[in-house]
Structures are given as structure tokens and as C-alpha cells.
Amino acid sequence: MKKLLVLVMFIMVLVSCVNNSKTKVDVSAIQVDFNIERFDMAFGETNPQDLPKLKAAFPFMFSNRFEDEFWISQMKDSLQQELHKETANVFPDLDKEKAEITELFKHLKYYNPYFTTPRVVTATSSVDYRNKVIVTDTIVLISLDTYLGDKHFFYDGIQEYLKANMKSEQIVVDLANTYAEKSVFQPIRKTLLDEMVYYGKLLAFKERVIPFKTDADNIGYSQAQLDWAKVNQENIWSYFVERELLYSTDNKLPNQFINPAPFSKFYLAEIDSDSPGRIGRFVGWEIVKSYLKNNSVSFNEMLKTDAETIFNLSKYKPEPNE
């Protein structure tokens, strides 16, 4: 019940964010106090005989399913040692990252006075790029080895579209996205429109809590990819409408237009090779922004509004590119 109350309060204070997807707020007076705890370095530098001390300091990092011998073997493993070495080389300090995370936390606290600054811990995860950031009520866990830069040799064999966002600049974006996922609710997503609007809500949420990041950063595009999406927005929309895809429940559509991919699958030779993946998220973002612009509603109301209503009242109609 307490968690529910806090979440409700979080959403209620977003009422002030009306009709402006790039709302700027003054958070300079808000205080957040935290240190980034380098478990990755501590684990890489700890001698086996000091393992009990490390476990006492970071108990949540050690599963009871494994005996001490497992952790000691990890300390001695040459691959793990190289992983820790490379992570330390890329991130000798985290001053820039802490500054951005501080701004994120300040914005979260601005919109939710009950927000409690979590314990922030960095680790390595054997490059588990599907779980780069984990957030609980009290702990943020960041896998630094998933942010070493898209050219890092550890990422050989990983597809380019995934490597593109495995860089330090994306840490705060991924962290904001995880908080967005915890705060944006929508009924079971059945149609392509449902998916588009859900991700549009996430992107709109992130705009408010990391306004210092660009739109390209927010959606995880290069600037060229974002420019392509904007220039071709009217053609993309025509494609969706003419093929009656918005209310389709075809389970292939998320893989074509929503999920991470090297490009969006229109199955048109002149488009596919140039398009960025996840184009449906971009369109959903535009629909949400249009809804906020054209209706006297609060951000809180938008979060609770179903996808079809948002679309119907958004008056979304991209202009042809001149």
C-alpha cells in the first residue's frame, strides 16, 4: 500500500507538466546525496581471503546459491580479470556519469517529493547487454561492462544496432527508461497502436526527467537516424494507415516496428535499408506529444489514458516533407 501511495503521489505531481514535451524545471535547489560504489573495482582487487569483508559490504551481490569457492574461482578467472581491467581503463572515474545521474535524481525528486535516493552500485556482468541497468526500491545496479563503447573488442560478434548504444552516454538514458517503465502503466498491449503509444509514453516521461539529453539520445538513435524519421514521418504514417496496421493484432508487427532491430521492416527496398529500427516508438512519441499539445490535459491524465483515446484526440497528422 505504501508503494502504491508513493507511486500515486509521483504521478499526481506530474500535473504541472502540461502540453510541453520539453518542460524545463528548476532543480538547482534540490539536494540528492549519493556515492557511486564501485563493486566492479572492489571485486577485481579483492584477495580471496578478504571475500567475507566484500560480502558483508555488498551482500545483495552474492547469491546464496553459490558457495565461496565459486566467487573465488571468478576472482581468479582470466576472462573476468580482463573484464575488470578493461572496465577500469574505460571508467577510471565516474564523475561525468554521476553528474548526469544526479540531475536525473533531482528531476525524479522534483516530480515526486517522496523519491528516495537509492544506493548506486556498479558491477560487471559478462557483457549481459539485455540487463544493463537494474533498479529496485533501494538499489540501482549498473553493469559498466555493457557501456565500454561501440568499438570495444569485447563486443565483437554483437550486432551493430545493439552496440550503438553500449556507450557511457547511454547510462543515464537507460536508467531513466527503467524508472519510466516502473511509472508508466497501460493495459495489456494487443495492437500496434497500443505498443506505439506505450513507448511514446516512456519517451515522454524520459523527456521530463532527463531534459539535458537530446531527442536522439532519448530514443537511442544517431542524429542522422532521428533526422531520417522526421523527414519520412508522413510516408511512414501513410504506410501504417493504408495497410490498416494501427489496430492489427498481428504478433509479427512488434518485431517489424517496435523491437530493437537494425532497421524497420516495411519490406520496401527503397526504405528498409535507410530506416532505423523501432520506428513505431518514434511515431508513438509523436502521437503522445500531439495529444498533450492539442488537449487541456495533465501529464498525469495522459499516463492513465488508453492508447485509442490518445490517438483519437491527438489530431496527429504529420505534414508532408517539402
Image (cartoon, grey):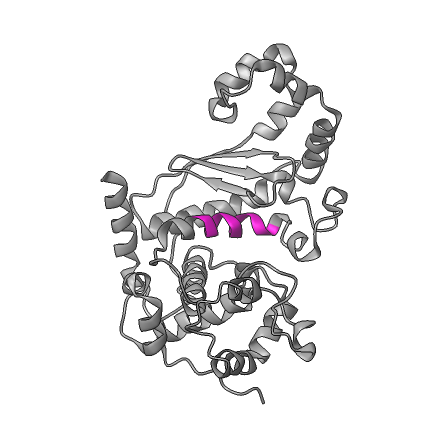
Tell how many labels: 0
- Report which quarter residue 189 is drawn in: bottom left
With 200 as the anchor, is 3 left or right in this view? left
Residue 277: image x %, image y %?
60, 65
The residue sitting at 38% across, 57% down in the picture is: 26
In magenta stretch: residue 313:
no
With 13 as the anchor, is 233 left or right in this view? right
Q: Is residue 204 visible?
A: yes
Q: Is residue 312 above or below residue 128?
A: below
Q: Is residue 139 above or below residue 23?
A: above
The residue sitting at 40% across, 70% down in the picture is: 288
Residue 110: image x %, image y %?
34, 51
Q: Quadrant of the N terminus?
A: top left
Residue 56: image x %, image y %?
49, 17
Residue 241: image x %, image y %?
47, 81
Q: Quadrant of the C terminus?
A: bottom right
> In the image shown, does 74 or 141 lie closer to the viewer?
74
Range of magenta residues: 169-178
